[in-house]
Amino acid sequence: MKIIIQLRSSGAAHQAATRGIAAPSVTSGLESAVSGISIDPQYPPVQLPGVQTTTGAGVRSLGQPLTFTLDPARSTYLVRGSIPDGASQAAALQSAVAHPDVVGVFSDPLIESCIVCPGDPPVGNASDVAKRLSVSKLVTKKMDGHSVFLAVVDTGVNVAYLKSKGRTPKLDIANSWVPSGVSTTPGTHPVDHGTMCAYDAGIAAPKATLLDYAVLLSKTPGSTVMAGLLSDAVLAYSKLRTILNGMPVAKRAMVISNSWGMFSPTWDFPPGHPGNYSDNANHPFNLIVASLETAGADILFAAGNCGHNCPDSRCAFGAAPPICGANSHPAVLSVAGVDVNKARVGYSSQGPGRLTAKKPDISIYTHFVGSGVYPEDGGTSAACPVAAGVVAAIRSKYPVSKLSPLQLRSLIFKSAEDKGGTGFDFDYGWGIVDPGALLAALP
Amino acid sequence: MATRMVTLRLDPSKATLAEIQAKYQLRPDQVDPKFGVVSVRPEDHLYAVLVDEQVASRLEGGEDVVGSFSNPKIETFGPPRKR
């Protein structure tokens, strides 16, 4: 057990505390006398001011008036160490407390930063995200998404709402698509998840040309209004591929942001079944994703919100890996979430992936005050379009003819700020997207 | 009834609803016309149609039928919901 030991005043302790240097000689007597005690030789003694109550009695409450003094004679000094756990702990503790140099022995508990979970308030705002993404640097290099298609495959975008938030989105209505049965038209869909995604993509790529693909407004049955069927996404992707193939190769640049997936394996055939989607490279949607990437699209998928620490209430994967289907496709960027303090949000799905193990690929910012559609732009749903915006910004100067989707992904991985374990890990992937470093790595 | 995506390997000139209905003796209402015939992998002449699971079972193993696949529900991810 880790402990903090409060020592009586001594010249050596005061000298070491004043200089901020460790002084093993201060505690050598204690280590010899107390069996099992171990003092941290690197930790310098810390002077604890002498405290006095107005009555002279001992401190019973921090609410009572107290006076403090830095007079060394009236101070005590803190060092840290450990005593054994188990049966011998009590004896070691008793022996330490009884030592003439010791005033008291206290626990030294582990402290950790608070991980962001569903329902937690937002951390930071869109301006913080823009700073972390070096957007001003991107803008000076005219990397703002201009001349790049950015398809938001989601619940639809509401342009009037984005304008009310100070954005000036450019929407290509002719190349957008609405599933049959949906009464609203591209850019006029109800303000919801898709509008949040469009807002977040615009943090790094305000000049991108939006393509509004309201796949999740499809009237095919789902349990919520933000649900659809995978076949709607197949249809959407076939239309996007037609558009992409129609672009001149020298100017070809299309980024596709997908903040959706499955929450439960029961929605699919089991792994091993020939008709399965989650684990099956031959599923038509996984094939069409591959064909679109081969044609030159940068495809991003949110990793999901089924992280071990505090998964979304809808998650039903249990111990099974939750990053599945196209969200784990080798030809896409699978995006995990961190807050603006660069700590992984507890609900961000962790790898391994099902179609390919090394997922998620990268992390980027989420859970911030942004679009105003929700109290926070959260989930890996927000992280994905934030990353899509960065990709679109790069594509303003680097169309596919200069940098293939695979090459760009490699540069993003190599320039990412490494977090978690050294190199790739299943929490952060290759790390947090670092546009500053990415700019330096571009050819 | 649940739907399935069935993939077929077809000559591009035969990749129409009318041709597929004729080849597999399907009624027009047995193949989703709004989904149509979707090119999945042009280089392999691979196409998909959307049918119900009964029709999918009937088509499995048929001439030029590559496979029958799930059509699962998909949902937006966030913001995350508290347990």
Image (spheres, coloured by chain):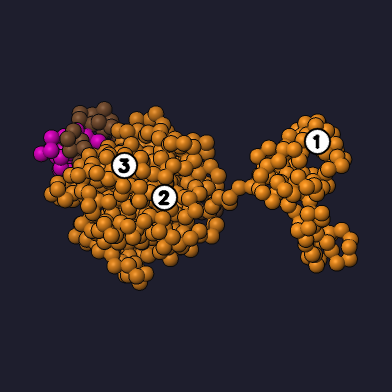
Q: Secondary structure at mark 2?
A: strand
- In this view, B34 is above or below A410: below
Rendered image: mark on residue A364 = 2
Using the rendered image, report if marks 1 and 3 lie on a common chain: yes
Rendered image: mark on residue A411 = 3
Q: CA distance from mark 2 to mark 3?
A: 15 Å
- In this view, A370 is above or below A303: below
Q: Quadrant of the N terminus of chain A?
A: top right
Left or right position of A168 against A252: right
Report which colour depicts chain B.
brown
Q: Magenta part of the protein: which range?
A: B3-22
Question: Is A208 or A306 nearer to us in this picture?
Answer: A208
Three-letter amino acid code of the residue under disc 3: Leu
Question: Is A433 or A171 nearer to us in this picture?
Answer: A433
Q: Secondary structure at mark 3?
A: helix
| Point 21% across, 37% down: residue | B41
| First-in-chain label (1 vs 2) | 1
Provide residue A113's location: percent of width, then percent of height. 58, 50
Three-letter amino acid code of the residue under disc 2: Ile
| First-in-chain label (2 vs 3) | 2
> The disc numbered 1 marks a residue on which chain?
A
Left or right position of A122 against B11: right
